[in-house]
């Protein structure tokens, strides 16, 4: 009962945080060369940016000063199609900018494709809103593609509170079975490996179109998976759920959530395997950093007087409430 005061507070916050779960809905700027000096441009703004725009804060692409644009289509969301003309040099050496990305708290993926089939992809965000097209080169290097999609993976796991909450509870579940020493290290390692293997399988299958599921049920079930982990941490719950089994079973599910983010960003056809692998590597880097931070933080909290059992129960009840509310909200969205 001492934790009862958390319930109304968490319920009041979950609506705010729910808006950010799987908030990785980047803008997309696609530029397709039509002739030597003209390009067909499709711009899709980050989801939700239209509601947050005001005055001169519209999230939109900015092209080089020597380019002229002719609008072809558009809608209230800010999406637009236009014809861009840029002179003899085309876009070689040009800089493409997406301004006001801070308004939407999201990123934007920029993809360029030339007449010869070569392409270039890049990710821009509020801190670095520009993509420079290499002068004299129309091909994005494998290193560039790999770096961009690895960055996407890290940013997605960092922004997904539901994935991070699941990982946190997995660490606590592993510690409950092996509190200290070598046993703890092995337990966390095997748990992380099981989760990685599982979500890598479904991420790859879904991103390549082999497995297709509607995103709404996937996101609702991801929230429900947190409830199962929270239940496993309350009295008598630890013995009913092995952490490696939970990591693998629910990892398959979370992989579908990662794949949804990757589909929104898009995969470059000429570097598809590399982009997929790099995104997965980025997700793993983000997970390793987070799990390491959790282990250090938990040890520090326990060192200042909070017993492992109290931390376990507080986390289970608090996160269970948040996950239950998120599950209900996501199920309700089925009918909207």
Image (cartoon, helix red, strand yellow):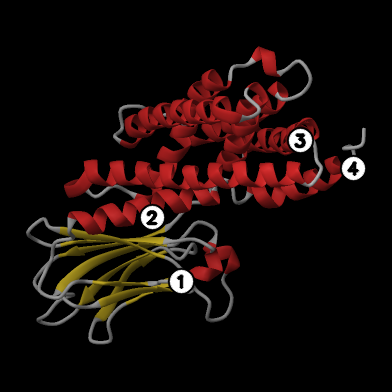
Residue picked out by circle 3 = 321
Q: Secondary structure at mark 2?
A: helix
Whole-Å distance between the Cαs marked 1 and 4?
38 Å
Label 3 environment density (alpha carbons within 10 Å; few <14, some 14–19, many ≥20): many
Q: Quadrant of residue 83?
A: bottom left
SS class, disc 3: helix
Asked whether the beta carbons under mark 3 and mark 1 sit within 8 Å of each other, the answer is no
Q: How crowded is the residue under tag 1: few (<14 C-alpha within 10 Å), some, or many (20+)?
A: few
Q: Which badge, 4 or 2, comes first in the chain's sequence?
A: 4
**Mark 3 or mark 1: whose residue is earlier in sequence:** 1
- In this rendered view, identify the residue nearer to me: 256 or 6: 6
**Residues at discs 3 and 4 in contact (Cβ within 8 Å):** no
The residue indicated by pointer 2 is 151
In the drawing, what numbered circle is on residue 5? Answer: 4
Q: Rounded to the nearest whole Å, what is the CA distance between mark 2 and mark 1?
A: 13 Å
Compared with 134, 311 (above or below) is: above
The residue sitting at 10% across, 69% down in the picture is 35
Q: Using the image, tell me which numbered label, if any, was put on residue 127.
A: 1
Q: Position of residue 76 (x, y in %)?
A: 49, 64
Who is closer to the viewer here, 223 or 228? 228
Crowding at label 2, few (<14), some or many (≥20) Cα neighbours within 10 Å? Answer: some
Q: Is residue 1 left or right of residue 277?
A: right
For the N terminus, the image quarter is top right
* Residue at 30% in and 56% down: 147
Q: Answer with the quarter of the image where residue 332 lies.
A: top right
Secondary element type, mark 4: loop
Q: Can the viewer see residue 223 in this picture?
A: no
Q: Are marks 2 and 1 in contact (CB under 8 Å)?
A: no
Q: What secondary structure is marked by label 1? A: loop
Q: Is residue 170 above or below residue 263?
A: above
């Amino acid at each position: 009962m001492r934790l009862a005061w958390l319930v109304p507070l968490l319920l009041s916050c979950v609506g705010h945080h729910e808006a950010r779960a799987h908030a990785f809905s980047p803008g997309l700027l696609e530029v397709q060369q039509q002739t030597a000096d003209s390009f067909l441009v499709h711009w899709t703004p980050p989801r939700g940016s239209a509601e947050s725009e005001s005055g001169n804060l519209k999230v939109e692409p900015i092209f080089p000063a020597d380019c002229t644009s002719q609008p072809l289509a558009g809608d209230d969301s800010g999406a637009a199609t236009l014809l861009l003309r840029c002179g003899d040099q085309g876009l070689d050496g040009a800089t493409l900018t997406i301004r006001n990305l801070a308004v939407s708290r999201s990123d934007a993926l920029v993809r360029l494709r030339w007449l010869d089939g070569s392409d270039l992809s890049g990710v821009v965000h509020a801190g670095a809103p520009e993509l420079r097209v290499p002068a004299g080169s129309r091909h994005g290097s494998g290193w560039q593609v790999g770096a961009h999609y690895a960055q996407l993976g890290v940013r997605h796991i960092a922004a997904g509170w539901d994935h991070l909450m699941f990982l946190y509870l997995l660490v606590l579940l592993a510690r409950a079975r092996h509190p200290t020493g070598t046993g703890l290290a092995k337990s966390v390692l095997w748990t992380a490996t099981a989760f990685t293997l599982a979500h890598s399988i479904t991420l790859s299958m879904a991103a390549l179109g082999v497995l297709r599921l509607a995103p709404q049920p996937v996101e609702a079930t991801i929230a429900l998976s947190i409830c199962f982990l929270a239940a496993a941490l309350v009295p008598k719950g630890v013995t009913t759920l092995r952490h490696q089994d939970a990591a693998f079973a629910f990892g398959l599910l979370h992989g579908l959530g990662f794949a949804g983010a990757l589909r929104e960003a898009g995969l470059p056809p000429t570097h598809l395997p590399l982009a997929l692998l790099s995104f997965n590597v980025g997700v793993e880097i983000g997970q390793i950093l987070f799990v390491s931070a959790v282990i250090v933080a938990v040890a520090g909290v326990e060192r200042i007087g909070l017993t492992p059992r109290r931390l376990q129960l507080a986390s289970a009840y608090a996160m269970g409430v948040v996950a239950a509310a998120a599950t209900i909200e996501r199920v309700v969205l089925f009918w909207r």
